[in-house]
Amino acid sequence: MHYLPFLSTLVTFAFATAVFIRYLRRRGPHLLLWTIGLLFFGLGTLAEVLLAFSFSGLVLKLWYLGGAMLTAAWLGQGSVHLLVRRRGVAWTLTGILAAISLLVAVLVLSAPLTSAASSYNVTQAISSQYKDILTRSGLIIAFTIILNIYGTLTLVGGAIYSAIIFLRKRVLANRMIGNVLIAIGALAPAMAGSFVKMGLIDGLYLSELVGVVLMYIGFIQATTVPVHEPASAAAD
């Protein structure tokens, strides 16, 4: 099932391109931050494609950094900018996230590899091998947990909050549905850890593909103007 990361990479970069084009038209900072988050996700799935052919310590570290640490946080930060009315608060949190991202990049890229790297198996998913290969300090593990909790709460929480608002107002059903799909899609990769623990190693790849496809569909739904609504009602 190692073809799944290839499909995920294609969908992710198409998704990122669509969001960035919308940013060029709308100039909303949340769109730029979502683009950054999707590029991190794409970096992670692209690394999985490359690692299916041969091992590279740098690629492994970029996989962990982009996919395991930064994706959710930057996607969630985009939702913060969309929903938080106080611009100063949103930009302050963005500055803190940027500083933490630089710190974790230094920590991960400088982390040593173990001797298990020499026995890396290209036929097995990286999710089943990285813990034996990459030396993760307590600080790296702590930041991984913190960044993913922050990203999940802001991205999924923001999408659910938006869906509830549209449901209560009984308007723009497409945006409500879109936000529900985004929330479900964002949770899909989070379930990958459970799949790995159950021995379903390729569950990570499947959950990544399902997650990004659902978020992409949700984005299209949320940004499509219904024929009976004025153009100004489109989502940012």
Image (cartoon, rainbow, N blue to C red):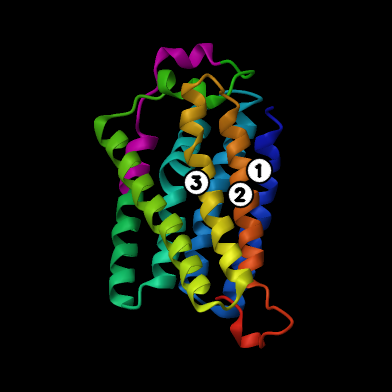
Residue type for callout 3: Leu
Q: Residue at x 65, y 53 (%)?
A: 13
Q: Is residue 32 left or right of residue 11?
A: left
Question: Dominant secondary structure of the magenta stretch?
Answer: helix
Which circle, 1 or 2, is nearer the viewer? 2
Whether residue 233 appears in this view of the structure is yes
What residue sits right under mark 1 in the picture?
A: 8
Contact (CB < 8 A) between labels 1 and 2?
A: yes
What residue sits right under mark 3 in the picture?
A: 187
Q: Residues within 10 Å of mark 2 (few under 14, many from 20)?
A: many
Image quadrant of residue 230? bottom right
Residue type for callout 2: Val
Q: CA distance from mark 3 to mark 2?
A: 10 Å
Report helix, strand or loop for mark 3.
helix
Q: Position of residue 120 (x, y in %)?
A: 54, 16
Q: CA distance from mark 3 to mark 1?
A: 16 Å
Q: Is residue 112 magenta?
A: yes
- Residue segment shown in magenta: 103-120
Report helix, strand or loop for mark 1.
helix
What residue sits right under mark 2 in the picture?
A: 212
